[in-house]
Amino acid sequence: MPEILPDDIQALRDALENSPDDVTVTLSLSRKSAEKVLELLEAEHSTGAVVVPLKDLFTTTEAAIMLGMSRPSLMKLIESGTVEHVRVGSHHRIPMRAIVRYQRQRRLDHEETAAAVEEFRSNIVFGGNE
């Protein structure tokens, strides 16, 4: 599987140096590199922040901390199939993409709930006649 080519790296550097605005450049990436770039862009879009993990798989304790929940709560999500995992021997490991996917879905669920509560509240206050 080909990795990022040195010419691609230089092409990106040149494009960034020569353009104060949007940059257009064509790169040849391995599938794994392209997936990582996509994850970074999606994370920045959904949270406004980008975290570059040093590894791809996390222990359940590490993942629970990253998700702001207890390990037993995470284990329930794993057992229900809500959070993707892989087995390493008898241990569960959580891929970074699964952590990001769960965070994104949780945020969307919260936004939908808030919108439904606001709609319900406005129907009560205004009697459904706005």
Image (tube, helix red, strand yellow):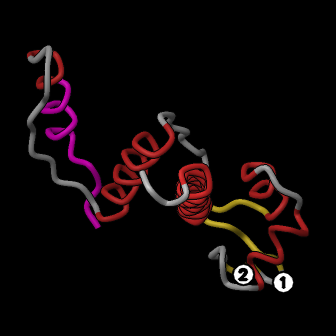
Kindly report the secondary structure that dominates the magenta region of the rendered protein: helix
Query: What SS does tag 2 mark?
Result: strand
Q: Is residue 96 at least partly visible in the picture? A: no
Give the image quarter of residue 92: bottom right
Amino acid type indicated by mark 2: Arg
Q: Left of 111 or right of it: where is 30?
A: left
Callout 1: SS = loop
Q: Which mark is residue 90?
A: 1
Q: Is residue 12 magenta?
A: yes
Q: What separation in Å lies between label 2 and label 1 (alpha carbons)?
A: 6 Å
Q: Which mark is residue 122?
A: none
Residue 24 in the image: above or below residue 115? above
Residue drawn where x is 83% and y is 55% of the image: 69
Percent x, y for residue 23? 13, 30
Q: What residue is drawn where x is 73% and y is 53%?
A: 67
Residue 24 in the figure: left or right of residue 125: left
- Does 124 appear above or below 78? above
| Amino acid of disc 1 | Ser
User: Which residue shows up at 21% across the image and 46% down it?
Assistant: 5
Q: Position of residue 86 (x, y in %)?
A: 66, 78
Q: Residue at x 9, y 38 (%)?
A: 25
Q: Which residue is mark 2?
A: 87
Q: Residues within 10 Å of mark 1 (few under 14, many from 20)?
A: few
What stretch of residues is rendered in magenta? 1-13
